[in-house]
Amino acid sequence: GIATLETTGFIDPLRQEIESGKPILGICLGLHFLFSESEEFGLHKGLDLLRGRVRRFPDTVPSSDFGLRSSPLKVPHMGWNRVQQRRAAPIMHGIPDGSYFYFVHSYYVEPVEEGVIAGITEYGLPFTSMIWRDNLFATQFHPEKSGAMGLRIYENFVRQITAPVGA
């Protein structure tokens, strides 16, 4: 994906928009692009706007019996799962903590800076499912497939776009 952004000349304009303070919403792969590097199809550089790495879900995870056995993990992670809010991101206004959203992904982000994590989800392991820093919002889940709660995220994001500067 980053290679396509490079060849089409979109990296510099995207950086300029983010640096201008304009609200930006990344979804799924859009979340992954923001990080330093990704393990998808080999090790590749990201936009490095947020420090951290995109990692693949493991094929197995320790069982609840003190890690003596492993349990298989279905990858990709597909379906409904809860998002536990770590911080009150403006795009989550009016959305109850622990609401369900729809996921379809094989990779997750591992931020270096805990302060950017706005939501976490459990799928074999706890992972970052939403980030927020200044004007930058991104979700691992797909709001467009997440019913009323997903529509609420878009509504809240539009409010960020149309809010007067400094509001």
Image (cartoon, rainbow, N blue to C red):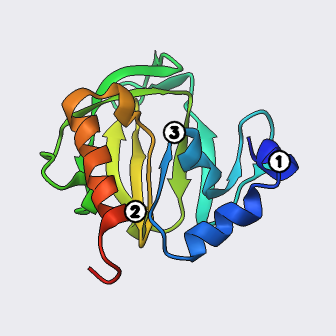
Residue 123 left/right relative to 12: left
- In percent of width and height, residue 85 lies at 24, 52
Quadrant including the N terminus: top right
Instruction: Choose between 155 and 85: the one closer to the eye.
Output: 155
Secondary structure beneath disc 1?
loop
- Residue 114 picture quarter: bottom left
Q: Nearer the viewer, mark 3 or mark 1?
A: 1
- In percent of width and height, residue 156 lies at 26, 53
Q: Residues within 10 Å of mark 1 (few under 14, many from 20)?
A: few
What residue does disc 3 label? 28
Q: Residues within 10 Å of mark 3 (few under 14, many from 20)?
A: many
Residue at horizontal 42%, vertical 48%? Answer: 128
Instruction: Choose between 108 and 70: the one closer to the eye.
Output: 108
- Residue 66 picture quarter: top left
What residue does disc 1 label? 8
Instruction: Choose between 107 and 11: the one closer to the eye.
Output: 11
Task: Looking at the image, tell me whether mark 1 or mark 2 is earlier in sequence order.
Answer: 1
What residue does disc 2 label? 132
The amino acid marked with disc number 2 is Trp
Residue 147 left/right relative to 145: left
Mark 3–mark 1 distance (CA, rounded to whole Å): 20 Å
The amino acid marked with disc number 1 is Thr
Secondary structure beneath disc 2?
strand
The vertical placement of 167 against 108, above or below, is below
- Residue 158 picture quarter: bottom left
Q: Nearer the viewer, mark 1 or mark 2?
A: 1
Q: Residues within 10 Å of mark 2 (few under 14, many from 20)?
A: many
Mark 2–mark 3 distance (CA, rounded to whole Å): 14 Å
